[in-house]
Amino acid sequence: PKPPPPHQHSTPTPTESPRGDRIRAMMATAPLLAELRPQPQRRGWKKAMLVSTGALLACAVVFMLLFSSHSSAQSKDKNVACLGCPRPVKATSTVGSIPNRPLTPRRSSFSLRHAQDYARASRPPERQPRKPSLPSLLERRSQADPRESKSRSTRVQAVEAAATEDAVLITSPNDDREYRTITLQNGLQVLLVSDEDADNAAAAMGIACGSWCDPPETLGMAHFLEHMMFLGTKKFPEENDYSSYLSQRGGMSNAYTSSDSTVFFFTVDADYFEGALDRFAQFFIEPLFNPSATDREINAIDSEHKQYLQSDFRRLYEVLKSQANPQHPFSRFATGDKTTLQKDDIRDRLIKFHDEYYSANLMRLTVCGKEPLDTLQSWVEKMFNEVPNKDLPKPAFPVDSPVVPEEKLPSKIDILPIADEHSLLLTWPVPLEFEELNRENPQGYLSYILSSEAPGGLVSELKNREWIASLSGRTFLQNKDLNLFSVSVDLTDSGVEHIDEVIDMIYQYLGDVLRNGINREQWQELVNLAEVDFRFAEKGDPGNLASHTASKRLQDLPLADLLSPPSRQLWRPDLIQQLIKSLKPEKMMLFVSSKKPFNKQVAASTEEHQEKWYGTRYRRSTLTKPQLKLWDASFSGHRKVDPNLSLPSANPYVPSDFTLVEEPLPLKQRRKKQEDETGLWSVNPPKLVKNTTSETLWFSSQAIKEFPVPRAQVLSVMRTALSQQCPKNQALTDIYFDIIGDYLMEALYLPSVAGYSFSMGNSEAGFSLAMQGYSERSLEFLSNALDMAINPPFNPLRFESIKEETLRAFKNFYQSQPYEQASHFMGRATNPEGFSLKELEKATAEVTLNDVKAYIPKLFASEWSLETLVNGNLKESQAEDINNLIRTKLQPAGTNATAATPNQQKFQLDVGEGSSYTVPITLANPEELNSATIVKYQLGSRKMLSTKDLAMATLIGSMIQEPAFDELRTKQQLGYIVSAGMGVSQNVFALSAIVQGAEHSAEYYDSQIEAFCKNFLSQLKSMPEEELNSFKASLESALLRRDLNLGDRGVRFWDPIAKQLYNFSWNLERVKALRTVTRDDLVKFYTEKIVNPSTRRRISIRMESPAEATREVPLVNPPVEAVTIAEVDDLRARLKPFSSTA
């Protein structure tokens, strides 16, 4: 339950599917990083478990431990050091994990470049970036195609042409933005981006200094510096001036620290860009590093570290680092905590570190605004020319001995995890140069082959044997000083017993690829697919573009490579061969994270270790000679490859017809504002094509005029009560859709690579369907997908594996973050329907394959109504064909017409006017140090609140975010997770706040949230009129923000359809009501809904750490007056739903 980054939509595109786009992303010029272990497919039970938590997650609780599913394939990622803090306005990051993200369409826009991890030693002598000489360039071009033979003069001309090409920025034909690069007098390199129709502006600064620069005696210094940069400058000395300015103007900011860089970025309403940019510039000119803030930020970093002490993801990675050469900064702790940073002279050390590494010549700035390029340039020259240029050398980290010591290769590390999961990680050092990996991307080709889920592939065969749940292979550490390739596997219970066989099959496949699988036609096919995506790339959030380009320019790559055009890739089979040959068994480090093998009896000579920073228990042993001999024989081809394994075949789904059904507007007119009679921007709603008692069809192709891409979306909901009648039905429905997802992952793999996606899943209303892809073969693809979904092969082994994974996920939930558990239990407490985790777990455990087979006909024969939206590059007649196809495929022959289904709007349970409840829950994990509290103030249902009330609720939610973070986190230092905001779930609006930390009790956090919410009333009363108007203008701008791409338009239409509201102009209505809101209105509304005990509706969930009894921190505010309820379900029994008519 991780929300998206704060600068992205809180509601993701319903049709988003990472499968095919993940593969094309692997072939992007910019190399990608691997996660330590692949994420299992999200099972249906999670959706059921997290019903009604939308309002809570709307608070933007956490930016993400793992990677966002909204990242773009055009990003150049590194391994995470600092992910970004969970704040809606300003954050100071998290450190120390590896990216673990599904990759989303290139068209989704540029991703935040989430960073790499960990510590740097004190700066060694400079190693200048390698600049290719003329001979090396000649060699490179000749290697691109060995069949080419050119005279020297011809080749020299080719090199000169290539050098000119390198200096030209290559953009998508679909991109109407204007770009310019400049270098300021102080040496600061700047990329200017002008988009005259932009609603949001953004800027990002990348600095070539990361955690590997940390002095050994103060690990975490780069991360600490990143935190301190936010807290006041000479020109703007107030600690929260920057964040308050952005908060009042629809903005946010964040930062992250990687191994070799730190990146700061922000977004803001485009009308206020100049003021925000001025404040941002001062970060790098005269930061104050206030002495009063140093201890607080050290506490924040310490809390950040403690938050992830129970994260198996981070624990495994830190064990991996502990095996590295201690002379290399990769081996060191990068997050920092009190033990590494709490020094008497820490501020002096911080200033010295800043002086040694922060210099204009080591910085790269990107500025994206709606102003003309000349205006943006004048602003940048005025604001950033004063950034000091100390002419510092770029940090480098040459180490004479290997990063992974030869004496530790090969080896096996057994790790004891917290959760009941089985993970396998194989890693090898890669000898290729960074430039070769970054430009030619041989690891992208190998990643595609290894991760292919097509029939006959490695993943398919291992799944068929019930040994794995997922597998991926790619580079997960990549910079100029260290490159590691990994294969990461999620094992099943059965797979744990066959680890050697799994590794043997991996080596069989690697050897087969080396000898038979380096195929130019296969490579060209992937590049062609990437070219199509690049050709039809759509705009995304400017914050993503800014952070991506600022970080990527630190690599000193040719400008032509900045936006990752596939045309820049070269066919280098020699590099692919060299990469595969480096993955020898004798160079492998093997990590097994599972309780089962760890707890087995081990030889007395096997020594157990405990990793220093996370306390992870592990054992290190040497791989045996028989093991190595077997794997080497498989790798070298001395053993026959398993006959069930085959290499990927040609893809018949590569799109070729890009005809558009609507005539696109000229580039400069595509996003011109369409205004209603009051001058407010609006969008024509979709057309209601069909509306009967059993079917409703909505259609729109108008977006193609603005977003001329040959793609289409189909979104359907089948409303039925059968799947929610009892825990067993919900469990059966979830497992059935899991079986479908597992089967279609392989059966539809080739079309998914070509950009098509299909999914079906359980929902509150019944079940839903989503399809997207190129419009050329949409109908054919959907028909095939539905046939497969209705009649999947019921493999008993796969069924048991899916059931096992689901049951394990239930168990592992209680090892998750306390705030995540609090969010779930809050959703459970206010959801009038659904079932508890225990009920669902019990029902799932009792489900048999025969139960599922018998249930499916009942599900589709039950009374259900169909509602569909077809959006994009299709004709109305095609939309009708699609709707009929879905109905005829899913409705069994002979079934009578579905009876009318009444409007099924659902409402949360009503806490009750004047009521306050709290539910204390002790966390099940005995090692968990953190406690968490989530508080919800119900404001009322959609029916009982007027449009003006809803406008005030939204306004208060935007106003309270930054003050809550500033008070509860920055000043009081309650914990790392602090957030507050307004959300809506099941047609009920609520203000929610959450705090998680390791220093206080959940009761303490509850009382501090209560005190803050009461004190905020005085801030409302005394807020200057100018500031209030600024918040109103910012909210108005946000509500009227235009869509950036076809996916945005689909979300805009589908949200009111799925909720059965059908009010496509709701944002306009709120804007009109917002303009009538006065301060007195806000004060009255806030007092009634939040402060007054006799009229408010309050509920809190307190997740108490088992270590709570050892803490003796008295409350500083009176305890919250509330009725204590022992169990969540006991509370549910007391409450009644909000009326649908009141």
Image: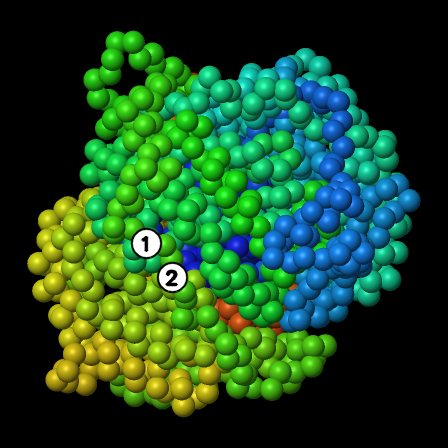
Q: Quadrant of residue 717?
A: bottom left
Q: Is residue 179 above or below residue 616?
A: below
Instruction: Give coordinates of residue 1084: x percent, y percent.
Output: 55, 57
Instruction: Give coordinates of residue 568: x percent, y percent.
Output: 65, 57
Work out which residue is located at the far right of the displayed protein and give it. 185
Work out which residue is located at the far top of the displayed protein and give it. 605
| Tag of residue 230 | none
SS of the residue under disc 2:
loop
Q: Amino acid at mark 1?
A: Ser
Instruction: Give coordinates of residue 1028: x percent, y percent.
Output: 68, 57
* Left or right of residue 193: residue 600: left
SS of the residue under disc 1:
loop
Q: Amino acid at mark 2?
A: Ser
Q: Which residue is mark 2?
A: 649
Q: Are marks 1 and 2 in contact (CB under 8 Å)?
A: yes
* Left or right of residue 633: residue 1021: right
| Tag of residue 646 | 1
Which residue sits at x=76%, y=65%?
A: 178
Q: Nearer the viewer, residue 401 or 530?
A: 401
Determine if residue 315 is in view: no
Q: Nearer the viewer, residue 720 or 1099?
A: 720
Q: Is residue 223 above or below residue 987?
A: above
* Left or right of residue 1041: residue 730: left
Which residue sits at x=33%, y=34%?
A: 633
Q: Is residue 933 above or below residue 1021?
A: above
Whole-angstrom CA distance, mark 1 to mark 2, is 9 Å
Count neighbours of disc 2 (C-alpha within 10 A) and say few if under 14, some if 14 to 19, many if 20 or more.
few
Q: Nearer the viewer, residue 675 or 1069?
A: 675
Instruction: Give coordinates of residue 339: x percent, y percent.
Output: 56, 16
